[in-house]
Image (cartoon, coloured by chain):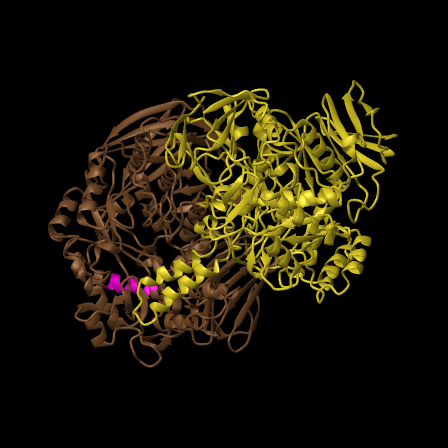
Chain colours: A brown, B yellow
Amino acid sequence: MLKANLLNFTTLYRFGTPFETDAVTLDKKSLNFTETEQLPFFSFEKNDTIFTLKFQLNEEDRIYGLGQTLGGLNKRGKRYKLYATDDPLHTPEKESLYGSHPFLIVNNKFGLFIDYPSEIIFDIGFTKHDIMEITIPSNNFDLYIFNSQNNIEIIKEYLKLTGTPYIPPKWAFGYQQCRWSYPDAKTIKEVAENFRKKEIPCDAIYMDIDYMKDFKVFTIDENKFPDFDKFMKEMKEKGFKLVPIVDPGVKIEKGYDVYEEGKEKGYFCKDKDGKDFVATVWPGFTHFPDFLNPEVRKWWGRKYKLFTDLGIYSFWNDMNEPSIFFVPDALKKYLKEINEMLNKEIGLEFFGIKDGINALSNKREYYSEFYHNTPYGKFSNEELHNLYGYYMAKATVEGFNELIPDKRYLLLSRSSYAGHHRIATIWMGDNMSWWEHMLVNIRMLLSLNMAGFFYTGADIGGFGSNASPELVIRWMQLGVFSPLYRNHSALGTRHQEPWAFDENIENIMKKIIEFRYALIPYLYSEFFNSIEELTPFISPLFLHYNDDETSFEIEDQFMVGKSLMAAPIIQPNAKGRFVYLPENKWLYWKVSDFKERNVEVLNPGTHYIKAGLNEIPVFIKENSLIVLNEEKLNYVDEKATEEIIVIGFVTDKAEFIYFEDDGESFAFKEGNYAKIKITVIKNKNGYDFEVEKDESEKFETSLKRIKFEIYNENNEKVVFTLSL
Amino acid sequence: MLKANLLNFTTLYRFGTPFETDAVTLDKKSLNFTETEQLPFFSFEKNDTIFTLKFQLNEEDRIYGLGQTLGGLNKRGKRYKLYATDDPLHTPEKESLYGSHPFLIVNNKFGLFIDYPSEIIFDIGFTKHDIMEITIPSNNFDLYIFNSQNNIEIIKEYLKLTGTPYIPPKWAFGYQQCRWSYPDAKTIKEVAENFRKKEIPCDAIYMDIDYMKDFKVFTIDENKFPDFDKFMKEMKEKGFKLVPIVDPGVKIEKGYDVYEEGKEKGYFCKDKDGKDFVATVWPGFTHFPDFLNPEVRKWWGRKYKLFTDLGIYSFWNDMNEPSIFFVPDALKKYLKEINEMLNKEIGLEFFGIKDGINALSNKREYYSEFYHNTPYGKFSNEELHNLYGYYMAKATVEGFNELIPDKRYLLLSRSSYAGHHRIATIWMGDNMSWWEHMLVNIRMLLSLNMAGFFYTGADIGGFGSNASPELVIRWMQLGVFSPLYRNHSALGTRHQEPWAFDENIENIMKKIIEFRYALIPYLYSEFFNSIEELTPFISPLFLHYNDDETSFEIEDQFMVGKSLMAAPIIQPNAKGRFVYLPENKWLYWKVSDFKERNVEVLNPGTHYIKAGLNEIPVFIKENSLIVLNEEKLNYVDEKATEEIIVIGFVTDKAEFIYFEDDGESFAFKEGNYAKIKITVIKNKNGYDFEVEKDESEKFETSLKRIKFEIYNENNEKVVFTLSL
């Protein structure tokens, strides 16, 4: 193997001839490779087709990372198979989800990233309690070892390697309503009108697969959307963004332009005989565009003109593992076998029949049966499997770069690979309306943030199965702290819109969403601060408090930015919960109506705090500030923010950097932003308040006033207003 | 409707002409019924085929009960469909499990029991947050309302109505090893020898379906068990009980005696044409014995002679919902439909094909297609569906009454109805090796105890899917406090025996099981005390501490008897957990080796306690005692207990009733037991120790010595030995 040092404390170990995945942005050509036989931390075994890394775990070793996976925040005790899979039942034993993010941290020891685009198995103390075994079915991959004992430094280094996280438009921090499906203009308008009439803030409404004509990508069903331009205009006037779904499978249908062009130009993945590979997905028989081919990406990216011309810059890419319901030949074979059994007596053979058909969806063999034509040669999908979702997003983003170079876009994908966080983001896939999935949401949000997906979220309220009103409320409360705040539910399940239950529930939901909008100045500022510092926006306690073991164990409390800790209620019927407050004092704010500051100072340690169904537990860290916008907004960009209120818990000194830009372009990159440093210092008689603008800024802030509401350790409040 | 008062505060409301289910032991003929139009607490609607009860919930209302159901300990926020169903995937949204126990408590208000043998739907604040709606698809049922505000009194009254809980033999408190399957004598012997060689205590080994010849009930495969009598003797000598499985489905096979007799005598359930109903289960095509017919029960019960003659008094009845893989005609119809699609182009019709075969198992329609011949007339299974498991157990117990009238038996069933707890018990069915299922285990253990199933348990380590060593250890630790302590795992999953992992894990498991055996004097005594007082043996905090809201919220701590609180670790990678200590001080004992008393006095309130992988958190209540047997045992009845050690946390006065009998007969009913009252009273200088035997006892205790180890509030220990 070869070895090269890079960045601050990273070593790249190169095995064989790895495929160039696009995960790493750093120029690898300039590296000085030397031969080596040694690996730090690991013992390893290799043969022609398989490579195994082994690491001896001590009882106190904790493993963090792996992005979008199930299991604890501490990944130990489970086996993970990083192989993009559309599995809609996220039960705890599942090893594969939609993406692959082979980056992890061994707490206090080191970090690693394996750049390899097909299946990698991480058995982390599952088979053997004290062994982490990583299996790569290849001898061609890049292994990066981050030789640092500092978790935050390791994450920074990973992000230097793979790129600065993607930044969505500001409105994407607003509330977003989704449903499979609001199938037509009429329904979407009703939903939109409901939000405005009820004065529940909302920024976006999603369009699931039914907006298309026969599920054909880049079409809009004219029966359902008779005058789409006009409809779009109306929606825009009301402040709504539309978010259409885009699936990769192109319907095989004579005369359908996307199909005809793709076929003619050879843009689809081929089978072993060079024919266009056929898989069945929503549109029926389809072909898969070969996004690993730059020419195909260019073609695909330009298709978005249909939407960008209408002012639509927000999309979600689904089914891009790619998911395959079945391959027609495989189904035919199965049905023939069944047919032969027709006249036999069938006993326990029944299970074979049943398992046979259930196994036809996303069968592993399919992925060896179609090929990509890449700049580096021809590869089966199996060999590069985990890249399909990323390259589909890349096709989209390359299109945007041409079509809307000045516009920030919202782009969610279901499947992803390491580095995807640089150009777009993901949502967490098809979860369920289970209380248990709120904890999964938190764990994954933290793990994905560590992998660079700062802006992400789960389907609030749960996608599959029916939700109770209480579950939706508690999940909406958790969602306040989720960068992507999207409520989504599946066909055939109970509706989950704020008004889907009764008036009392609706009022609670409205207050929750209002709190989220009030928090946006804080969230948006801290998001940019996180990007600048390359440290997770939403983060586990242990990244901040690593002197106490307990901070490493807590999986259901987390930091949102640097000043605020969330401890959502995620148990049914609970009107309270345990919290662990590390190190300093905290200001406990039980939010039902964000304008009422029902606060209490709590000492560090263990508490059982009460929080009724309409109350959100929020903790403000000692000597820190948050900022709120108290003005009523129907959507994020409705009005410029002229006044913010700074709420602080200050026993000594606290600082906050308020960030502002146009919220929709990349002009911030040229310094077109405002940064305002707000400082509160305790003095003998009260507080000193300082506000300092960044002199270099080219962007004029809309802020006119800053109000302060500062609490001391005795829960005494000082208020002060400062005009700019 | 009719109304009659009974017991202390119970009113029976009779609607129409209910089927006599056997749930209630009280003589209902002597009741004085009067006409009424009114129901307390409820509004109701009825039409010809459906009856709906509605109760308005306040935000603070909590609902407990419903026996074997998923959902929280507080049953609010979920919909439950009590209809016996073999569903092996206990995901949170599931509404039906294996049994029906329609008894619940509205905290601080009242209790109710609906005696109706088919589906009842409880929608408890699920559809509407503030409504509990109970739907009974019939106008013939008995509704009992327990008009008391005292939860324990309501439970007592329910048990007076439905009978004193079943008492297993003493050995059943020992550790039990199960696996699907130890298929033959050789394997079972190896397992048995492993336990003895490694000196890991164990009392029972289970025999799953593979011991039978072709899955035929009441057969033993002679190839697998060449000399069963000799094998049994060997097992007995080693102190092992064997526990064979018994399924209801009788294989259709010419010459097979059970089939031939049943067919000849008309003992099987009939279809609508009067022919024996055919269903497919493990043996292939089978008939179901009609256990609702007393003559059939007599026949079936006598079949157990095969086993009782060999000294086997322990069994588990499985598949008795009854589970139906498919009905041959339904499969044929499905396959024909599929066959017709063979030459068509299949797109999304695929899902119909897939759903079609998956729906063939346990299809609801099947249960309307076969009939029972009961003393009250002919009924479809649908009408009496939830009784099948109970009546199968009743057949078994009626057989035991004839065959082994003096022997206490272990009888587990998968399906059950209210009242089943009187004659036998259940295990919790096919759970999974999921951390989440440890919480399900606890919630169900508490709910089942409230429904009279004092002796019950879940499959330790989880039945389905693969377990990590850590999960099995943590679950084995939880199991110490589970009356039924059975480790079980499914075909094709990872083994879970104490030695299935590595030596370190095995040593930890051994210490855990040793602790369980040491605790048996406490468990056995408290079990009998619970039976005598008709109060749950394993109970939620709120039954003891109802002055503080928090005690009602805690679902993962529970009382084991009256002196001991368990707070097991049920999160992966946790080396500690939050605990809430109500009202008094508690002695925290972190058990790794039970002979080492690593104790600490904790104040009431909230704590984060540490407990490493090998440590079990145990809390002894202030002013109470537990008793341990420190002698090494390979199995419960190996040696008579001559010495116990009383461990107490006494700041004032504590009492304990030690119970002893022969452990295997019903002689205790005639006073053949020893009851020893142990009292520890704090005085100025130390403690007074009193031991008082029940003078009326006819049974001579084996106890010769009682050692005391008493802690005060300063964690100071006093030891004392008393000879009897």
User: In the current view of this chain or complex, which residue is farthest to the bottom?
Assistant: A273
Relative height, residue A22 to residue A174 (above, below) = below
Rendered residue at 35%/31% (across/down) = A647
Asked whether residue A163 appears in the rendered view, the answer is: no
Relative height, residue A678 to residue A145 (above, below) = above
Rendered residue at 68%/47% (across/down) = B301
Relative height, residue B621 to residue B219 (above, below) = above
When asked about the image quadrant of residue B42, the answer is top left
Magenta span: chief secondary structure: helix
Rendered residue at 61%/39% (across/down) = B420
Q: Position of residue A505 (x, y in %)?
A: 33, 32
Q: Which quadrant holds the C terminus of chain A?
A: top left
Relative height, residue B589 to residue A188 (above, below) = above
Query: Viewed as shown, does residue A79 lie left or right of A330?
Result: right
Q: Position of residue B387 (x, y in %)?
A: 55, 42
Q: Nearer the viewer, residue B261 or B542?
A: B261
Query: Viewed as shown, does residue B500 lie left or right of A2?
Result: right
Q: Nearer the viewer, residue B672 or B301?
A: B301
| Magenta stretch contains residue A393 | yes
The boundaries of the magenta stretch are A389-398
Query: Viewed as shown, does residue B197 lie left or right of A506?
Result: right
Rendered residue at 38%/44% (across/down) = A466
| Magenta stretch contains residue A579 | no
When asked about the image quadrant of residue B489, the answer is bottom right
Q: Position of residue A41 (x, y in %)?
A: 57, 63
User: In the current view of this chain or complex, which residue is farthest to the top?
Assistant: B684
Q: Nearer the viewer, residue A61 or A695?
A: A61
Query: Viewed as shown, does residue A142 lie left or right of A208?
Result: right
Q: Position of residue B481 (x, y in %)?
A: 66, 40
Asked whether residue A230 appears in the rendered view, the answer is: yes
